[in-house]
Image (cartoon, rainbow, N blue to C red):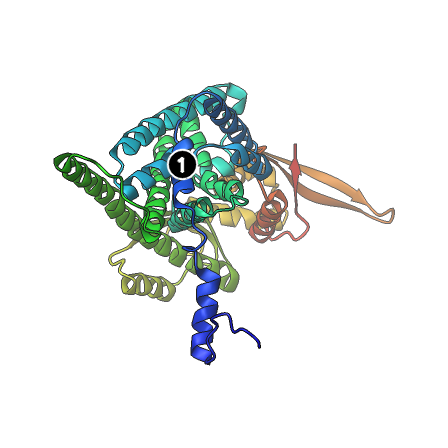
Amino acid sequence: MEVNEGKPDNLGGGIRFFLKETFNIIDDTDVNATIDDIKAGVPIKGQTAWVLIFSILIASAGLNTSSTAVVIGAMLISPLMGPIMGIGLSLGINDIFLLRKAVKNFGIMVVLSLITSFLYFSIPVFQNETPELIARTAPDVRDVIIAFAGGLALIIAFSRRSKAITTISGVAIATALMPPLCTAGFGLATGKWHFFGGAMFLFSINTIFIATATFVIVRFLKFPFEHYLDSKRKKIISNVIYVSAFVILIPSVFFFYKLYKQSDFNQTISHFIQEQKEKKGVLIFDIDKNHSKKEISFAIIGNKINEKDLNKLKTLLSQKGYGNVKINIVKNYQESDKNKTLNEDEKILLTSQKIANNQYPIAAVFEDISKEIHAIDTCIVEVSYGRILKSNFDSIDTIPTFYIKWKEETIDVDFKNNQIQNWLRVKTENPKLKVLAIQ
């Protein structure tokens, strides 16, 4: 006789059984072992302190060279998650003593990390701004998702009887914590306070959401509350814990909403700009999106953005709750009025036409053109110009050539060169003009 093993016969019951069997985390939870493991990871002292220092040093070097592999390597050995998980657990089980210990070690962790990254970035040769560092100065809603999902993954992994994936889950926590702390140290070392402020804001948000994730799972799994013999003391401690939990949970909701709106605002602008580039042929650069001030600034070269498109953007932003957005167009080389006295931009355009007709050389307006090139991309260090003689043994041709030197950390140099080359060819009406990168 075949045993059904408690499986339901009907389809609905079968689906419920499948879902419960797939997503159930309660049956495989080892409460006591989980609490012991988290408590053991709270102290930052001895070997743990040294591991933290070296992992921060490695992560700083990775950010300094924009090496994702090096940063990930640092995350694999980082003990950053211990005190933060301790805070979430203490709030979840009403353990005031664990809360004190976790907060104390959290402070030690932050100070050690900042000192280590500060000392690294105090060395002059390591003070260049890289894309990896810049990316940690402006948090958005995706950072919240990474921190919260990482916190959930780690506490769930810790709660299992088998700890096979605990270390791997710790990488998700380190992803949210290590780069911001290293970037904050960079800001301190270089005196760039917007780096320090932005990175610490990101670190604070990540810390709050990781602790919140731990608290949520601890309560979902119904970990037992800490017992106190003195009922009066128990009540006081419970009140302190509830207030602390409230202080963590409320900012979580606020920060998530704020960052979601900021990301939505920036995404709307980015879609508009991309559409103008691809469909209208407008070259847009120096883009500055300020959600808090409801202001957008950018410069344009080539075809202008018509009033209808601008009004459409304003209407879309207004529908999303961003009314009265101010749009500043810094330059628009197509807006000149033929009946007005020529301004500087129009003079440059006329000069470009004369260049194309060989009425006088590019060298005559090289200073103006080089300034415009630098305005397009501030990663450009130097611009040179020369004329190359080219022979196919039947005839000799002259190729006007711009040589551009980029900052070492610049990415997509070939794409940027082509973009500037296309613009210069249109500007000078010379399809033979070349733009080359130099070291």
In the rendered structure, the answer to whether residue 234 lies left or right of residue 31 reads left
Give the camera-side residue of 49 and 366: 49
Q: Where does the image place residue 26, in percent across and percent down from the top left?
A: 40, 55
Give the camera-side residue of 99 and 79: 99
The quarter in which the C terminus is drawn is: top right
Residue depicted at x 36% and y 47% = 213
Residue depicted at x 73% and y 40% = 388
Residue reaching furthest left? 232
Give the camera-side residue of 382 and 50: 50
Label 1 element class: helix
In the rendered structure, the answer to whether residue 191 lies left or right of residue 247 reads right
- Is disc 1 surrounded by few (<14), some (14 to 19) or many (20+) residues within 10 Å? few
Residue depicted at x 49% and y 22% = 47
Give the camera-side residue of 157 and 114: 157
What residue is shown with label 1? 36
Q: Is residue 389 above or below residue 191?
A: below
Residue type of the residue flagged with mark 1:
Asp
Q: Is residue 116 above or below residue 332?
A: above
Residue reaching furthest right? 393
Q: Is residue 289 above or below residue 67?
A: below
Q: Where does the image place residue 88, in percent across and percent down from the top left?
A: 33, 41
In the rendered structure, the answer to whether residue 106 lies left or right of residue 369 reads left
Residue depicted at x 71% and y 44% = 399
**Which image quadrant for residue 244?**
top left
Whether residue 190 is visible: no
Q: Where does the image place residue 89, in percent across and percent down from the top left?
A: 33, 41
Whether residue 123 is visible: yes
Q: Where does the image place residue 70, in percent across and percent down from the top left?
A: 58, 34
The quarter in which the N terminus is drawn is: bottom right
